[in-house]
Image (spheres, coloured by chain):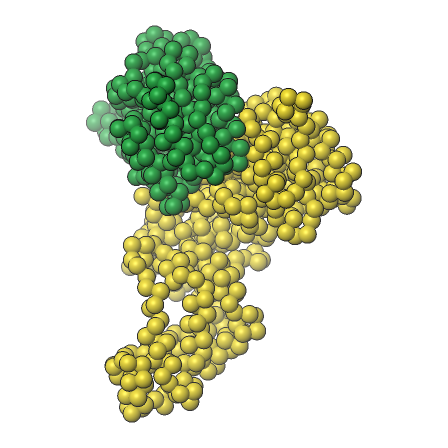
Amino acid sequence: MFESLSDKLDAALKNVKGEGRINELNIAETMREVRRALLDADVNYDVARAFTNRVKDKVTDESVLQAVSPGQQFVKAVYDELVYLLGDVHVDLNQAKRPPTVILIAGLQGSGKTTFTGKLANYLKSKGRSPMVAAADVYRPAAVDQLETLAAQVGVPVFSIRGEDGVPLNDAVEVARQAKEEARRTGRDTLIIDTAGRLHVDEAMMQEVVAIKEATEPDEILFVVDSMTGQDAVNTAKAFNDRLDVDGVVLTKLDGDTRGGAALSIRSVVEKPIKFASTGEKLDALTEFYPDRMAQRILGMGDVVSFVEKAQEQFDAEEAEKLQRKFRTQDFDLQDFYDQLQKIKNMGSLKDLLGMIPGVGKAIKEIDVDDDAFKHIEALIQSMTPYERANPQKIDGSRRRRIANGAGMQVQDVNGLLKQFREMKKMMKTMSRLSGKGRQVDLAQLTRGRGRR
Amino acid sequence: MALFGFGRNKDDQDKLEAGLEKTRSGFFGKISRAVAGKDTVDDEVLDDLEEALVTSDVGVKTTVDIIGRIEARVAEDKYVTTKELQALIRDEIASLLLESAPERPASFSAPLPNQPHVVMVVGVNGVGKTTSIGKIAHRYKEAGKSVLLGAADTFRAAATEQLEIWSERAGVPIVKQYQGADPAAVAFDTLARAKSTNADVVLIDTAGRLHNQVGLMNELSKVKRVMDRQVPGAPHEVLLVLDASTGQNAIRQAEAFTEAVDVTGLVLTKLDGTAKGGIVIGISNEFQIPVKYIGVGEGMRDLQVFDRAAFVHALFEGGDA
């Protein structure tokens, strides 16, 4: 039911490909499909419409209409526009010139403020800071207990005011004000103030959070929003921003399967950067926000960047450089291939990895991917001498027989591997030539996002 | 107001209408603007209607369905005035919303078909499960029923404490263990206690979980299975709590929770914001699950039995009708 946007684009572009050109008629049809797909991803209606209009302007440009592969140009135009809308670059938290840095957390009920407060404390602590959290949600039953439990797990002090009967003091502004004093007195460099969830139409509650802001003069105000929010996300974000002039947005519950179109809408309406993405129940499930990854998610393109990052854990920059040079100069041999296989195996389950590659995830959803898939290839390469690995073209009939015997396999298997390897090299040659000239869609550019406009 | 039945009183209707005020001014306002100065339904009107429905989170699929049917009607009748259009839309939306099944009466005072009548409450994180349970407990208690709460959210920090506070407010007993305890065991114990104390209604709270987390969804299925061993047929109801501000992901939630625990009804919370709750129209259309309760505020009484006639009425007519 939730076809990905890229699927829809593909489908819509089939017509275009058949005709070999984009014309106004199929652009209009495609743009309607794109708009519907965006709406299905919860992108705000007005934002979706403005978006498709801009993409339309881009692709009706003469140069695109005459391009060799208008389909890819089309996808790239959509992707570029998405990344632009999500904010080109990642933005860090503000810091006070004189500590403590005060961070105020605000948002609707159930958006995940208290959990995020705990995660942020944990994140800052891991960066060498000494945060303190303050429990200024004095309304929701047991909210103070929840923050106390989280703070204990993280190992940071928590500030709350309870009466003699153990009931929290019913004055959020006072709690926040005293918390700042306490943070200064005890030499904490950061204070995170958790506040009660409130509806933006609840005037009394909005006044309260404004009063907390005035009393504590926060350096950073973060608006926390559930990434599953629908069309209303824009209205709430706008209302909070109008009252508080927030510094950044936090997206929570991104570990669900929501497309998170709300993120796109909020960013483009309130023009404030999204700073964090919260992705799970565990305290360390918090990541800095990257616009390009979100764009890929909304498009249903898979998560190329996470794939690359996993790869980076295995390949250091120098090695990658060497490898790239080998690709270009055609020096890539079977030994290199074998080394790569080992590294891929270290990256984790094959199925998970394939799932991150655009278009592959869905195709293999129902298929069991055998993690031993490389076993035979490995056995064959292991049966080769270093000379053979470096010079696959020198492997003649008798060598093939020996290798097959050594691996306990047939000569046909050796032939198969060598043929595959030749084709792989051919592909590498084509790819490196393409990216070198940068004429067609540059894959590297696509995953890196748009640095400049 | 008696027309709408279910013990609805003037207060409730006012509250619902106040809660829906934003929805109405958005939705109704848009439709009004869409049809202003027009005599007949043309493409432009339908486009504006599409916008009104989509921006209420009704969803593209259901919106296209509704527009398609209206288009067909317009083509058939040749001439439809904009006044008739409003009635048409109202009929269409009302027909997509389902009434609660008789074996799961929505009214708090209605006699219950089982004793204990066991209700399991599920949903993703932060939708308002615990708060809804507190309110439902209060309403049942008010209607003269004995209620027992089961704190099977043993995961989230202080969830049990939160339910405990609600149990004190509503004046109903609670069965609990410690944080990290096996939720199935808590549910099992709660039902044992319900049998021995002859409770009329049992409400089981569960930890919020995202519907795509297979392990946690399996855990939920297990909690449900275990209840049947203690009280055959239990749980008799499984309520999925949805935040009214949720977008199209709610459809996925309904799908996944139905697969895991066979959801019998929906609770739509936080309808007092500007969120439109249009997703329930889409969910009713695609999954045939009725909306049972709606949450329209933070107070103990701010939970109502869902009445589709009143809902659609409030959506279109406003307070003075």
Q: Position of residue B15 (x, y in %)?
A: 46, 15
- Is any part of residue B251 visible from this angle? no
- Image quarter of residue B207: top left
The residue lying toward the viewer, choosing from A285 and B294, is A285
Q: Residue at x 42, y 24 (%)?
A: B149
The image shows a total of numbered marks equal to 0
Q: Residue at x 49, y 50 (%)?
A: A294
Q: Position of residue A113 (x, y in %)?
A: 56, 36
Residue B232 to residue B221: above or below:
above
Residue A430 to residue B74: above or below:
below
Q: Position of residue B129 (x, y in %)?
A: 44, 29
Horizontal relation, residue B104 to residue A272: left or right: left
Q: Residue at x 66, y 37 (%)?
A: A158
As drawn, which residue projects farthest toward the front?
A: B196
From the image, which quarter does the N terminus of chain A lie in?
A: top left
* Letter of the green chain: B
Q: Residue at x 38, y 49 (%)?
A: A5
* Letter of the yellow chain: A
Horizontal relation, residue B43 to residue A75: left or right: left
